[in-house]
Image (cartoon, rainbow, N blue to C red):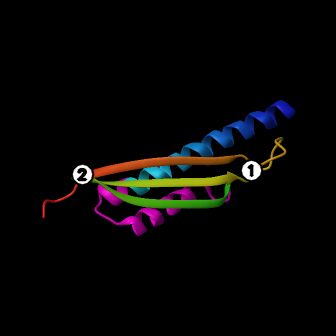
Amino acid sequence: MVLAMGVVQVVMLLYARNMVAASAHEGARAAVELGRGPRSADEIARATIRDSTGELLDDVVVDVTVQARGTRSVVVVDVSGRLSYPGLLPFSPSLTARASASQETPAR
């Protein structure tokens, strides 16, 4: 029984890690490919986390920055959270992910 609970906890941890990475990617993609700004990137990343993990993550933080690098605009989305799934571990692991997307800025 302990082994089964341990396997379930590892699976939940891997799923949450993948969802954190996917939400960072979706936020960065929205800002660049869909032509939306940093606020929309934040909202989309949060919605992706909320819709895919429900109550699995606590203390979700999304940070969006936009940087100009020469003729390119780079959007970086950092997402972090803490696994709240009760299990055998005496602590709640933290998960973080970073995704970036860039686009050529129009000539002025």
Magenta stretch bounds: 29-55
Left or right, 1 with reference to 29: right
Residue position marked by numbered label 2 in the rendering: 70
Left or right, 37 with reference to 72: right
Would you call the spot at circle 1 few (<14 residues within 10 Å), some (14-19), or many (20 or more)? some
- Position of the C terminus, as image quadrant, is bottom left
Q: Is residue 52 magenta?
A: yes
SS label for mark 1? loop
Our reading of the magenta stretch's main secondary structure is: helix
* Relative vertical location of residue 39 with respect to residue 18 in this rendering, above or below: below
Q: Nearer the viewer, mark 2 or mark 1?
A: 2
Q: Amino acid at mark 2?
A: Gly
Image quadrant in which you'd find residue 39: bottom left
Q: Amino acid at mark 1?
A: Tyr
Q: Report the residue at 35% width, 66% height from top.
A: 37
- Give percent across and percent down for residue 3: 82, 30
